[in-house]
């Protein structure tokens, strides 16, 4: 998960990563035996290149074979497992619900900070010069960031 764009998004990212790690902890030996490092490295570069739209090599549900899987599907599958794992910790239930709800919202609409920037800028470019469009995008971005509004609640209309 990428950083930001708001503090609450970063907290949600962190909690999701921790929850996902806790969720797979019991299976980690098996997962690392069937998903060697070179596949992990390959997944890293796919995610870096294609972002949330990447397909990654991931174990099939029965964890016997590897297959190309959309990154959003991996996140969708891990989200309830992360929630359950976090509920067995000292993390406040309301905080788990609030922060993982942010991740769920981003998964549902398939949005990242970079996608939002591209889409809103394209929208502005229909009626503005490139300089104006980028300034408008940055102004909206900073406004949303200052209010700490989670990314999945940001508007895409110009």
Image: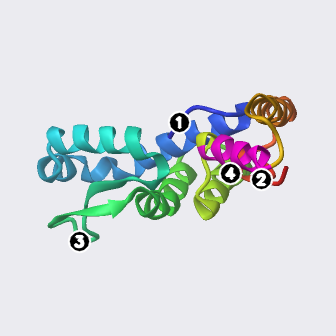
The first of marks 1 and 4 along the sequence is 1
Residue 135: name its quadrant: top right
Secondary element under disc 4, as helix, strand or loop, is helix
Query: Measured from the top left, where is residue 69 in percent x and y?
Result: 32, 63
In the visual, does 39 lie left or right of 111?
left
Query: What residue is rendered at 87% in x and 34% in y?
Result: 147
Which of the two discs, 4 and 3, sits closer to the camera?
Answer: 4
Secondary element under disc 2, as helix, strand or loop, is loop
Secondary element under disc 3, as helix, strand or loop, is loop
Q: Could you tell me how far apart the alpha carbons at marks 4 and 3 are, in whole angstroms?
A: 28 Å
Disc 1: which residue: 2
Q: How many marks?
A: 4
Disc 2: which residue: 156
In the visual, does 85 lie left or right of 29?
right
* Within-10-Å neighbours for mark 3: few <14, some 14–19, many 20+: few
The first of marks 1 and 3 along the sequence is 1
Query: What residue is rendered at 25% in x and 47% in y?
Result: 28
Which residues are drawn in magenta? Answer: 115-126
Disc 4: which residue: 102
Q: Could you tell me how far apart the alpha carbons at marks 2 and 1 are, in whole angstroms?
A: 20 Å
The first of marks 2 and 3 along the sequence is 3
* Within-10-Å neighbours for mark 1: few <14, some 14–19, many 20+: some
Which of the two discs, 2 and 3, sits closer to the camera?
Answer: 2
Disc 3: which residue: 62
Residue 79 shown in magenta:
no
Task: Kindly report the secondary structure that dominates the magenta region of the rendered protein.
Answer: helix
């Amino acid at each position: 998960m990428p950083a930001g764009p708001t503090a609450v998004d970063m907290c949600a990212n962190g909690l999701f990563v921790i929850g996902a790690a806790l969720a797979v902890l019991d299976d980690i030996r098996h997962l690392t035996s069937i998903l060697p490092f070179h596949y992990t490295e390959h997944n890293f570069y796919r995610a870096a290149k294609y972002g949330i739209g990447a397909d990654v090599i991931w174990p099939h549900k029965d964890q016997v074979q590897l297959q190309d899987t959309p990154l959003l599907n991996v996140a969708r599958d891990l989200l309830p497992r992360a929630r359950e794992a976090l509920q067995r910790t000292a993390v406040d239930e309301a905080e788990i619900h609030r922060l993982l709800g942010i991740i769920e919202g981003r998964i549902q609409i398939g949005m990242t900070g970079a996608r939002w920037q591209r889409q809103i800028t394209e929208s502005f470019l229909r009626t503005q010069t490139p300089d104006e469009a980028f300034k408008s995008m940055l102004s909206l971005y900073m406004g949303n960031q200052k209010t700490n509004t989670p990314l999945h609640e940001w508007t895409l209309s110009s």
